């Protein structure tokens, strides 16, 4: 997994405004850049995104009109960490969500509580860096929210 | 067979040609844009006098029904008005009534003879639908028998215990089928009916049939098949298999039929109904033979059939008469493969069943050869209707562009 870090960093530099960003390949590798903790988290989180989130929120985080909301510039994705963690753990909860400004989205997002605290932290750190330019989320924060829900 | 036709919009309504998506239709046909964009269109109908009515997903300040008229019958729809404090998918005509299917209620408006717009307040016909999101769009049809048919999509993918959760088993029996996942039929003229108390479950085991058309003694329907086979059961299905499975099934439904959702899905490659992984399937085990209604045609996976029109006109050549046009909204869930659909197909029929494979009738709506996400599509085919002269109308959900397809090829 560490070998894919530079690819993730390249994605971040390129930004998310492209209409057709390259699909994650996890094959690029360079050893000249030393990863920091966030970069590792972003790389791991991207793999989780591909597995658990991409189908609905799409390869570029843009969502699907009327179906799934975009993550790009999402106030929820870039907002309060505890709210975001709760959303990922429990999902939308079976009610049709009414989101401001953009109307209703038909799909109801499931929670992914089966992911570990570290995996959810990585996933959200990736989403926040890639799509809303917000700060990372730590496993400690995830664990705290999970404990409150249990 | 397909030839690009010029969209003749420049002289109409002062609109510019679509440009970003010239659609192609078969030789002998002409596609004409009659309106560049009425708004976020869903289904449409055409009245006997030629007036066009389009249901909008989000209503304008003036209303959620776009009403268009070509008063001098020159092919130019000079007049457009919006009416009705409603928004949704379903729309149907029956006598001097215009029926409208919102997500959680069906209403009707009086539509006096010669009036372009419906008048008065909506009259509630059916309410009490579960407000659960997912597949809530209520497509409707008042059938040849005068009854009101309603698609009640299942608020689920595959009726799992834990919704869309990897490995979660399916509920057995699936309780959703008591109130959704089927087509219900109601008295079209009786107000304030309650779902399910006052209706009859006409057919069940249908995940979501946005495309329905009642003709003769059957409902022709095309179903949105389930998705996420690979992400929910990665040990059984690859992403490539998810892109190709399951088929979108076309049914000829009679009362009491069962399309097999959520217990089964249809594998178009094997041409066989399979046991769903939520119910013990493994991608190789067929469903119990004879238990469920077989599709009369299998379309590629995830194309999203959003309208079906059994062609009853005489303008089109003999090949098309009695056959089925299907509007495919286009997929969003084939990643990592490119998205697909975004076209209108035609299936020839004889004796109430397909007499041949489907063919792409109208294409090019998306405006690009490769679509990775639906947001890239310039247009997404959504609604179909037949005009009194046998013309075919197509509307799209992105801008609400409306095309009229006429046969101009001369004698057969």
Image (cartoon, coloured by chain):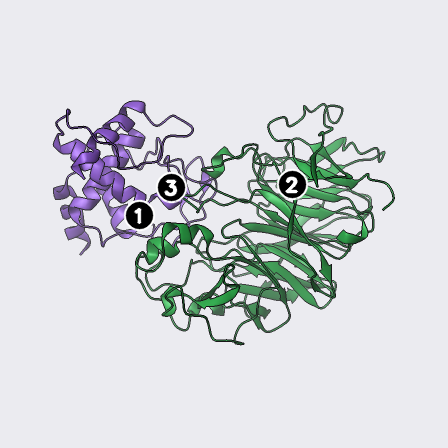
Chain colours: A purple, B green
Residue placed most toward the observer, B3 or B386: B3
Residue shown at the point (36%, 36%) measured from the top left:
A61
Q: What is the residue that sits farthest to the right in this orientation?
A: B411
Residues flagged by tags 3 and 2 on a common chain? no
Number of residues whose C-alpha sits closer than 10 Å to that of mark 1, classed few (under 14), some (14–19) or many (20 or more): some
Q: Earlier in the sequence, mark 3 or mark 1?
A: 1
* Numbered disc 1: secondary structure: helix
* Numbered disc 2: secondary structure: strand
Up-down: is B317 above or below B378?
below
Residues flagged by tags 1 and 2 on a common chain? no
The chain letter under disc 2 is B
Circle 1 or circle 2, nearest the eye? 1
The chain letter under disc 1 is A
Residue to which mark 2 is pinned: B395
Number of residues whose C-alpha sits closer than 10 Å to that of mark 2, classed few (under 14), some (14–19) or many (20 or more): many
Mark drawn on residue B324: none
- Percent of width and height locating residue B403: 69, 37
Q: CA distance from mark 3 to mark 2?
A: 26 Å
Residue shown at the point (72%, 45%) measured from the top left:
B118
Up-down: is A18 above or below B331?
above
Up-down: is A23 above or below B263?
above
Residue to which mark 1 is pinned: A52
Q: CA distance from mark 3 to mark 1?
A: 10 Å
Residue to which mark 3 is pinned: A57
Residue B360 visible within the image: yes
Residue B126 visible within the image: no
Horizontal side, residue B192 vs residue B156: left or right:
right
Q: Which quarter of the rendered picture does the N terminus of chain B lie within?
A: top right
Residue shown at the point (67%, 23%) measured from the top left:
B16
């Amino acid at each position: 997994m560490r070998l894919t870090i530079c690819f993730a960093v390249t994605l971040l530099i390129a930004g998310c405004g492209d209409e057709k960003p390259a699909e994650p390949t996890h094959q690029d590798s360079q050893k000249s850049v030393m990863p920091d903790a966030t970069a590792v988290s972003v790389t791991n989180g991207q793999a989780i995104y591909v597995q658990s989130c991409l189908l609905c929120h799409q390869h570029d985080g843009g969502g699907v009109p009327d179906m799934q909301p975009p993550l790009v510039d999402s106030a929820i994705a870039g907002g309060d960490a505890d709210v975001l963690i709760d959303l990922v753990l429990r999902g939308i909860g079976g009610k049709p969500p009414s989101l401001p400004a953009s109307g209703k989205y038909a799909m109801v997002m499931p929670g992914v509580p089966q992911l570990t605290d570290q995996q959810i932290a990585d996933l959200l750190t990736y989403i926040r860096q890639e799509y809303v330019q917000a700060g990372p989320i730590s496993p400690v924060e995830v664990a705290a929210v999970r404990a409150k829900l249990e | 067979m397909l030839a690009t036709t010029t969209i003749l919009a420049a002289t109409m309504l002062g609109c510019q040609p679509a440009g970003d998506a010239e659609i192609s239709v078969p030789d002998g046909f002409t596609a004409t844009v009659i309106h560049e964009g009425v708004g976020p269109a869903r289904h449409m109908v055409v009245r006997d006098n030629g007036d066009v009515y389009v249901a909008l997903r989000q209503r304008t300040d003036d209303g959620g029904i776009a009403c268009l008229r070509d008063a001098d019958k020159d092919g130019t729809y000079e007049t457009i008005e919006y009416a009705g404090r409603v928004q949704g998918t379903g729309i149907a005509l029956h006598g001097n009534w215009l029926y409208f299917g919102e997500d959680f209620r069906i209403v009707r408006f009086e539509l006096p003879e010669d009036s372009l717009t419906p008048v008065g307040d909506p009259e509630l016909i059916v309410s009490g639908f579960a407000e659960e999101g997912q597949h809530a769009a209520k497509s409707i049809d008042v059938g040849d028998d005068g009854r009101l048919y309603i698609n009640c999509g299942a608020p689920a993918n595959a009726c799992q215990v834990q919704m869309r959760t990897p490995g979660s088993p399916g509920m057995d029996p699936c309780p959703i089928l008591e109130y959704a996942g089927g087509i219900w039929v109601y008295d079209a003229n009786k107000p304030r009916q309650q779902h399910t108390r006052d209706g009859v479950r006409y057919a069940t085991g249908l995940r979501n049939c946005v495309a329905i058309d009642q003709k003769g003694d059957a409902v022709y329907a095309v179903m949105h098949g389930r998705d996420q086979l690979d992400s929910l059961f990665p040990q059984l299905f690859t992403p490539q298999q998810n892109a190709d499975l399951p088929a979108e099934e076309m049914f000829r439904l009679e009362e009491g039929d069962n399309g097999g959702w959520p217990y089964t899905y249809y594998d178009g490659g094997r041409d066989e109904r399979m046991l769903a992984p939520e119910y013990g399937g493994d991608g190789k085990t067929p469903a119990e033979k004879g238990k469920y209604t077989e599709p009369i045609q299998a379309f590629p996976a995830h194309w999203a059939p959003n309208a079906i029109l059994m062609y009853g006109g005489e303008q089109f050549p003999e090949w098309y008469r009695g056959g089925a046009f299907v509007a495919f909204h286009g997929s969003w869930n084939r990643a990592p493969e490119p998205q697909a659909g975004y076209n209108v197909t035609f299936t020839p029929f004889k004796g109430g069943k397909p007499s041949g494979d489907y063919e792409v009738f109208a294409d090019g709506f998306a405006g690009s050869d490769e679509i990775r996400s639906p947001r890239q599509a310039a247009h997404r085919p959504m609604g179909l209707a037949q005009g009194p002269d046998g013309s075919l109308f197509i509307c799209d959900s992105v801008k609400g562009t409306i095309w009229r397809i006429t046969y101009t090829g001369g004698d057969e």
